[in-house]
Image: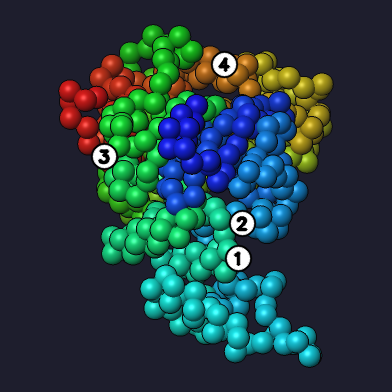
Amino acid sequence: MHQLDQESGTAPLLALSGVSKRFAGIAALNKVSLSVRGGEVMALIGENGAGKSTLVKILTGIYQPDEGSITLGGVKQGFGSAQDAMRAGITAVHQETVMFDELTVAENIYIGRQPCTGRTGRIDWARMETEAEQLFARLDVAMPVRTRVKDLSVAQRHFVEIARALSQDARVVILDEPTASLSQREIQELYRIIGQLRAAGTAVIFISHKFDEIFTVADRYTVLRDGQFVADGALADITEPELVALMVGRTVQQAYPKADVTPGAVVMDVRGLSHPTEFEDVSFTLRRGEILGFYGLVGAGRSEVMQALFGLSAGVRGAVTLDGEAFAIGDTAEAIARGLAYVPEDRQHQGAHLTLPILHNITLPILSKVGFFLRGRRTQENSVARHYAEQLELKAAHLTQHVSALSGGNQQKVVLGKWLATQPKVLILDEPTKGIDIGSKAAVHRFVGGLVAQGLSVILVSSELPEVMGLADRIVVMHQGRIEQIFDRDGATPEQLVAAASGCVLAPEEC
């Protein structure tokens, strides 16, 4: 590994060796090593869940590694906080900038370390504004330093973040999906600034799902997959299809056996579903007994579409029919009454009531059937909860145990049981196995297979290619709020799905 560093004869400015990080026993990173030299742009590449965000948080001092080492400028580092990482010279510019909207540009750049006058110790406002102007002059960017941040564009906010990094003499700048909300002109401006950082000897780690950007600005690449290092090298020595293959690189048939079910007639028809800011012209059909997969990268709009179908979003246009009957978009109660159920991605905040017992969580959507704290209905409530707990292989001491005391996987099973108790016609599963262990994943997959065998229709939103390819009959790929392509199960390869999700088009012979 890092052969390129040895061949160039230049020692890396930043090097990670054997870095691991676990959360509740699940490995987010497993013995990852990488390096980046001063004056180099290194693209950090991987699917959602590959470990990129965890790695960035370790580099910026938010997380501390369980094992492994970080070396900066040949000196071993130990970042106990974000402030430690910033003082060492590592800073990150995120897709969603975090600044004080009511403060000015200059105030945001120097927040917490404002220049002061020697005699009184008061903030030297004139000096702060002058130094901020000098930073933007270095970037060749016109920026009114007295303007409040709330009045800036997204691109201008990014430039403020970069100026703040320069003001701290940053040696390593991490750009995490920096172009997600920028226009083409603004992207070109960002490219120019990245070139300036490279020329100044700054090491840049560039994270993006867009291959055209990666090949435009980066010198080298490092690929992560499932929290592990896969490959690194010079971008000049690799093609886009080869890079996609490194990101995917997994067989899925054995891990996710598909239930042998032949889908029936159309049960749901969605036409022209649109939202002012999140997605546009989304149309698809769902058949009885079918698992329809939705795949895409972060920000593609998949979860937003599902929330709109379940009536959780305002301002949505389009037409939806369920079993041939139209129902009003934006009315959650009607969606549930018509037979729609939604298991959200955020189970702790949106899916379960953590301070309530298991049995109350499972029966919450069907209180009208079992009663609410009525002694005469307690037997029925216990019976319903026990049925779904057994079906989902829920591991708990008893049904009166609070959901907060369960593992993440078992919390997810409670949320599944809660919505299955409504006996829906269509079940939407948004990242149903996110953050849960392999055994719990297998239990959820087996249960979903049994449901579709009984005629239930499932929409499966997943960032895990093996999951969506292993379980789905058809796969809808979204990119930037639109449906990019719909694949049949037997006609899709991992490379094609990743390419469509990234908005790039591969020639048939390259896929």
> Which residue is pictured at 49% across the width and 79% down the height?
134
User: How many angstroms separate mark 4 from mark 3 (CA)?
Assistant: 32 Å
Depth check, front residue: 361 or 252: 252
- Neighbours of disc 4 within 10 Å: few (<14), some (14-19), many (20+): some
Say whether disc 4 or disc 2 marks the residue closer to the N-terminus: 2
Q: Nearer the viewer, mark 3 or mark 1?
A: 1
**In the image, what residue type sits under mark 4?**
Ala
Say whether disc 3 or disc 1 marks the residue closer to the N-terminus: 1
Report which quarter residue 488 is drawn in.
top left
Residue labelled with disc 4: 442
Residue 375 as seen in the image, left or right of residue 85 = right
Label 2 close to label 1 by CB (< 8 Å): yes
**In the image, what residue type sits under mark 2?**
Gly
Residue labelled with disc 1: 168
Say whether disc 3 or disc 2 marks the residue closer to the N-terminus: 2
Res. 273 in view: no
Report which quarter residue 366 is drawn in.
top right
- Residue 500 in the image, given as x and y percentages of width and height: 29, 36
Residue labelled with disc 2: 89
Residue 306 as seen in the image, left or right of residue 35 = left
